[in-house]
Amino acid sequence: MILGAVGLLVVIVALVLAIVRGLSAGHAESSRAGLSGRAPAPSDIPPPDAPQHEGGAPDWPIRVDSAARIEPRAGRERCSRCGAEVRVGDHEARLVAGRRLRLVQLHCRRCGGEQALWFALAEPLPEA
Ligand SMILES: [Zn+2]
C-alpha cells in the first residue's frame, strides 16, 4: 500500500514536471513566434519626427513619371498648417543619396507658410 502511494507520488511528480517543462517550452515557442509574427514593418511605425505625408522628405518623395507632372501634382497640395491652397514656387534638382530628386517650394496663399515637397522622377525606361 505504501509502495503504491510512493509510486503514485512519483508518477504525479513526473507528470507535474512534464507539464511544467511542456508549458515553458510551449511558452518560449509562442513568444518567439509572436515576436517574429507581430514585428511590424518599419514603415508601420514612423519615428516621431518623420514626415506625416508623402513628399514631405527626400526619403519619401512623390513619384512622378515625368517632370511635367510635378507642377500640377504640387498644386494639389494643401498648406500643412492651415489647409489652404498653395502656390507652387521654385523647383530645384537635388541629388540625395544617389537619387535625382526635385525639391519644390510651396507657398500658402492664406497664411504664407512655406513647405517643401519632394518628388522623384521615375527612371527612364531603357531603349528597347
Ligand atoms: Zn497656410
Image (tube, helix red, strand yellow):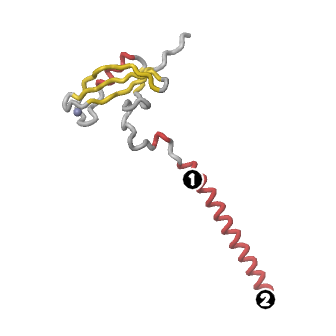
Which residue occupies 51% across, 15% down?
125
Q: Is residue 88 left or right of residue 128?
A: left
Where residue 20 appears, as percent x and y from the top left, is 66, 68
Q: Give the camera-side residue of 124 and 103.
A: 103
Q: In which quadrant of this rendering is ligand 1 seen?
A: top left
Q: Residue lying at the far left in this picture: please name it.
A: 110
SS assignment at label 2: helix
Where residue 107 appears, as percent x and y from the top left, is 25, 27
Q: Mark 1 belongs to which amino acid?
A: Gly
From what the image shows, is residue 49 above or below residue 114?
A: below
Residue neighbourhood size for the residue with mark 2, other residues' Cα within 10 Å, grouped as few (<14), some (14–19), many (≥20): few
Which residue occupies 36% across, 38% down?
52
Which residue occupies 68% across, 66% down?
21
Q: Is residue 82 left or right of residue 97?
A: left
Q: Is residue 113 left or right of residue 21?
A: left
Residue position marked by numbered label 1 in the rendering: 34
Of callouts 1 and 2, which one flags the residue occurring earlier in the amino acid sequence?
2
Residue position marked by numbered label 2 in the rendering: 2
Q: Mark 2 belongs to which amino acid?
A: Ile
Where residue 123 appears, as percent x and y from the top left, is 48, 19
SS assignment at label 1: helix
From what the image shows, is residue 3 above or below residue 18?
A: below
- Quarter of the image where the N terminus is located: bottom right
- Quarter of the image where the C terminus is located: top right
